[in-house]
Amino acid sequence: MIKKVLLIFLIYLSLLSELFSKEKIIIVSKINDQIITSHDVKKEISYLKILNLNLSELNNDKIFVIGKKSLTNELIKKKELLKFFDFKRKNSYLDQVFKNFYENLNMKSEKDFEEYLSNKKTYSIKEIKEKLKVEILWNDLIYKIYNNKVKIDESKLIKRINNEKNFTNEYLLSEIFFKIEKGEKKNTKFKKIKSSIDNVGFSNTANLFSTSKSSSYGGKIGWVQESNLSTKIKGELKKIDIGQYSKIIQVGNNFLILKIEDKRSKSKIINKEARLEELKKFETNRQLNLFSNIHFNKIKINYVSNEI
C-alpha cells in the first residue's frame, strides 16, 4: 500500500514538473509570505488586455511589468483588507458591480461573458468576482477611515449652480494620475511619461505609470460634465481638442494629465437641489480617490516586496 501511494506521489511530481517545464513557470515576486509566479502574471495580463485593447501594442517586457504591478497592488490591498473584513461573507453590492462590469465590456449577460472568457487564458467568473470584491471592500475601508476628512464648501457649489447655463458641455476623458516617488526627479519623470505617450499611446502609458484605479482600463474615466470640474481643469481642457491631451496639472502632491476622447453639449433643466447633491457626491468621490492613493502608498511599506 505504501509503495502504491509513493508511486502515485512520484507520478504527480513528474506531471507537475513537466507542466512547469512546458509553461516555464517561475517565481517572479514575493509579497511577505505569498508568491507571484509568471503564470499568475500571464493570467493578469490576459485580463488587463480585456480592459484595455491597446495593451497588446506594447512589447512583452512592458506588458509583464504592468501585469506584475497590477497583481502586486491587488495582493497588498487584499492582505490589508483581511485585517478588517471577512472575504467569505456575502457582499450585497457584488452582483450589481459585476453586472455593471461586464455590461461596460459590451456583454449582454453573464453567460455571454462566461463564453467570452472561455476563449481567453485568464480568470474565471468566480475569480473576477473575487477581484471586484477587493475593490468594493477597499472603497469601503477608505470611506470608513477618511469620510470625516472630506471637506465640502456648499456655498461654493451653490454659487457654481447659480452660474450654470441651461446646457452643459460633457467630456469623455481618460487620465494619467501619478506622483513623484522618492529619489525621482520631477522633470525627468515628466519627460519619461510624455515620451511614453508619443511612443506607445495614452492608454498604454496610463497602464504603465498611472496610480489611479482607472489605470487598469487604460485610464478611461467616462463622460464628465464640465460643470463638475474645477476651474483649473476646465481651463486646461478648453485649450485642447478631441484626441489631444492636456499639459501636466498639479493636484495637491500628485500630477494629472487628461485626454479628451470626445465631447458633446446637451440642454438640461437645472433642479438645484438634485444638482447640489450631484456635485457633493462628485467632490466626495474625488477627495476619497485622493485619500485612497495616499492610504495605499502609506500601507504598502508594511509589505515586503522581493523581486526575484
Image (tube, rainbow, N blue to C red):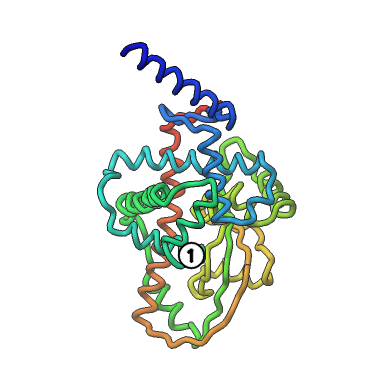
Image quadrant for the N terminus?
top left
* Mark 1 residue type: Met
The residue indicated by pointer 1 is 107
Query: In the figure, is residue 197 to the left or right of 109?
Result: right
Spot occupied by residue 7 in the image (x, y as percentages of width and height):
41, 16
Q: Which residue is farthest top? A: 3
Query: In the figure, is residue 202 to the left or right of 10?
Result: right
Spot occupied by residue 201 in the image (x, y as percentages of width and height):
69, 55
Number of marks drawn = 1
Residue drawn where x is 42% and y is 38% of the image: 76
Circle 1 Cα neighbour tier, 10 Å, few/some/many (<14 / 14–19 / ≥20): some
Spot occupied by residue 272 in the image (x, y as percentages of width and height):
37, 82
Query: In front here: 287 or 128?
Result: 128
Query: In the figure, is residue 2 to the left or right of 124?
Result: left
Residue drawn where x is 55% and y is 54% of the image: 50
Query: In the figure, is residue 295 to the left or right of 182?
Result: left
Query: In front here: 255 or 36?
Result: 36
Q: Is residue 4 visible?
A: yes
Query: In front here: 254 or 259?
Result: 259
Q: Quadrant of residue 111?
A: bottom left
Image quadrant for the C terminus?
top right
Q: Is residue 307 visible?
A: no
Does residue 183 sit above or below 235 in this rendering?
Answer: above
Residue drawn where x is 36% and y is 11% of the image: 3
Spot occupied by residue 68 in the image (x, y as percentages of width and height):
54, 39
Tag 1, which secondary structure?
Answer: loop
Does residue 36 sit above or below 52 in this rendering?
Answer: above
